[in-house]
Image (spheres, helix red, strand yellow):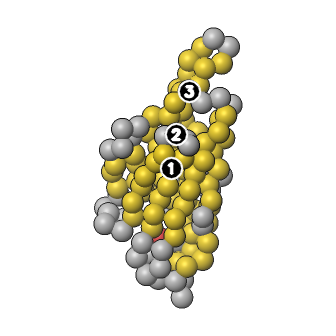
Amino acid sequence: QVQLVESGGGLVQPGGSLRLSCAASGSIVSINDMRWYHQAPGKERELVAGITSGGTTNYADSVKDRFTISRDNAKNMVYLQMNSLKPEDTAVYYCNADVITYTTSVYRINGYWGQGTQVTVSS
């Protein structure tokens, strides 16, 4: 099975920076797309940024030019560098990955979610 674990969240003042990390572990053959989502209380979970296995990135308009997604395929990790943080960025941030596994002589691809890490931007 596969587990995703996020880290790096916390409390930061407006204009500050944080770097989130997500580590994937388990019976992993390879990982296709990796993504960061966030969800604020009372709102839908929303895609923040995505990155393909080849390094192509995309961003929500609200974070473009402020956030940077990157990955390390050798380490099965994805990162989100968040700069110029705003109070409206406050949310739980979730890592999501499409993971290829091989168990019981079967290749599978499934989406997995981490448990989330809280980011609070406040003065």
**Residue 86 placed where, x, y %?**
44, 77
Q: Which mark is residue 99?
A: none
Q: Report x, y in % for residue 10.
A: 61, 72
Residue 78, label in figure:
1
| The quarter of the displayed image where residue 113 is located | top right
The amino acid type of the residue labelled 1 equals Val
Badge 1 element: strand
Q: Nearer the viewer, mark 1 or mark 2?
A: 2
Is residue 86 among the parts visible in the rendering? no
Q: Is residue 122 above or below residue 99?
A: below
| Residue sitting at x 39%, y 60% | 68
- Give the amino acid at mark 2: Ala
Where is mark 3, residue-wise? 29
**Label 2 crowd (10 A; few <14 / some 14-19 / many >=20):** few
Q: Residue furthest top?
A: 105
Tell me the CA gap for discs 3 and 2. Answer: 11 Å
At 60% from the left edge and 64% from the top edge, which residue is drawn? Answer: 8
Q: Classify mark 3: helix, strand or loop.
A: loop
Dot 1 or dot 3: first in sequence order is 3
Q: Is residue 105 visible?
A: yes
Contact check, label 1 and label 2, Cβ < 8 Å: no
Q: Is residue 94 above or below residue 107?
A: below
Report the Cα–Cα distance between label 1 and label 3: 16 Å
| Mark 1 vs mark 2, CA separation in Å | 11 Å
At label 3, the amino acid type is Val
